[in-house]
Amino acid sequence: MTTQRTSGRRKQALAAAAAVAALLTTAACGGGGDDDGGSKNGAAGFDAANNKVAQASAVKKGGTLKFGGAQDADSWDTTRGYYGFMWNFARYYSRQLVTGKTEPGKGGAQLTPDLATGLAKVTDAGKTYTYTLRDGVTWEDGKPITSKDVKYGIERVWAQDVLSGGPTYLKEVLDPKGEYKGPYKDTSADKLGLKAIDTPDDKTIVFHLPQANSDFEEILALVSASPVRQDKDTKSKYGLKPFSSGPYKFESYSPGKSLTLARNASWKQASDPVRKAYPDKITVTFFSNANELDQRLLNGDLDLDINQTGMSPQGRTTALKQHKANLDNPVSGYVRYAVFPQSVKPFDNEHCRKAVIYGADHVSLQTARGGPVAGGDIGTNMLPPSVPGAEGQKYDPYELNGANKTGNVAKAKEELKACGQPNGFSTTIAVRNNKPVEVATAQSLQASLKKVGINAQIDQYDGSQTAGIIGSPSNVKKKGYGIIIMGWGPDFPTVQGFGLPLWDSKYILQSGNNNYALINDKAIDGLFSQYVTTLDDAGKEKIATEINHKVMEGGYYLPFVFEKFINWRSDRLANVYTSDNYSGMYDFVNLGLKSAS
């Protein structure tokens, strides 16, 4: 699992939360304005594209699809990008052996062949994966994409000294001992020395895993497994103009300002069952001010927000009153929560942890995050609804959405007595200073805990230094951070893609740690070990449910919300739908327009 990032989740822009941070106000929670149907100007209707396809029959070939954003990608290099919207957008110019289906909701999280003729032929008890490449797959200059190009693109993940930033699952699954040094230090003549991948001919690629991992195809579906051609690899500059294997290619890019993709004339529809390539051109305009972005969306100058982190309060309020038919309210893949480091007393005692869980006012916490519409449903457990094995609000072991919705003072005091702190205690809540919504959440929690005798002070730390502050267990202990406010979403929609860095003891790190609770539970570790060798979906779902139950039983987390957003789609958009594969974002790859104008 990735260790060099401040999180192992599929990252939305860290600073794009200029838009997310917005969820402070509750003004947008009530809706109002247009009814749920279509509008006079031709919008599809409120939630018309949420887990279903809107305007599919209206899509036309041609025109310019116009994105806006308050945040550029971390990198457009397929090896280095980690923001969720980058992974979504990168499918315009990059292909993978397999990818998510172009279907709404849960269907989008299922895998389908892309460069490969089919899903993997899996042998050797889940340790060998074999693929054959399709006929007619080419680069933007018309040269064929070969198995060696796929292997080289994957090998770049090992070049962390030059290409850091992206997910490193491939490195850890294929080379757990770290024996390969990457293509830039490769002494073999063809720079294809990674022993775990064979390319017996230009159409065949074989992966040899030292240990089975039942999510390996999920990992190959990430854009970090995209092919890269050696003679076009500009190393650290590759993200400025990646060489295209998809239906569009980079025409121009000014970092932080604009990006334009044009058609790749060498791409053949017959070779690509995934992409329909409806628009002639795709543009992205970046804004430093989220309110300006929202205004341009409202004016009809842009079609959608590339960041997909929800409108900010000002734009959201106007949109809900005047343009409700242009909005969708998807559940994101994120759970927002408080976590209790066991190194900080008295949170080494599960009853003290549970005193906080029972003492919190969960409606107040939901309101602080933006209410049920802009913030999300009250979180009752730690597995996001998009992950197989999740039970949503049906699994509510502490009755956070039931009897204890506004807190249970009596129950909290029982737990305080059980942990030897009958008169309460003092602690510190750590919260990022660049996330106003998190500060508001901390203040809500502080107020409700005071009622049960827990006095919490709030320490706002530098949010750009998360990895070295709350990601350092020694610093957390030194600072006395008994409660940390955080959030997490899956890199890929499985319990491994979400929970492994949070809950498995192997991922307790001295820097860049994400197992903030310092969970060291042999039962949880054993379930993860069992999960990666379980090849049937039903068995995997059962284990995922068990892992979530074990985590909740330990009282390591206080979930706030299963996060939701308010996202905009223009009147012009067609074939638009949200996908679980991209944490409730619109699936970009087959968006089209209702006319070519």
Image (cartoon, rainbow, N blue to C red):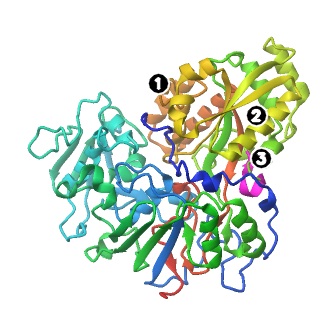
Q: Secondary structure at mark 2?
A: loop
Q: Residues within 10 Å of mark 3 (few under 14, many from 20)?
A: many
Q: 98 left or right of 36?
A: left
Amino acid under label 1? Lys
Q: Residue 255 appears in which quarter of the rendering?
A: bottom left
Residue 483, image x and y in percent? Answer: 69, 28
The image quadrant of residue 451 is top right
Name the residue: 74% across, 41% down.
441
Residue tagged 2: 397
Q: Are marks 2 and 1 in contact (CB under 8 Å)?
A: no
Residue 126 point in image, percent of width and height: 35, 39
Left or right: 347 with respect to 138?
A: right
Secondary element at image label 3: helix
Q: Amino acid at mark 3?
A: Ala
Tell me residue 182's x, y (percent). 23, 39
Q: Which residues are magenta?
A: 371-378
Residue at image x 46%, y 29%?
Answer: 529
Mark 2 vs mark 1, foreground winner is: 1
- Secondary structure of residue under mark 1: helix
Residue 575 counted in the magenta span: no
Q: Nearer the viewer, mark 1 or mark 3?
A: 3
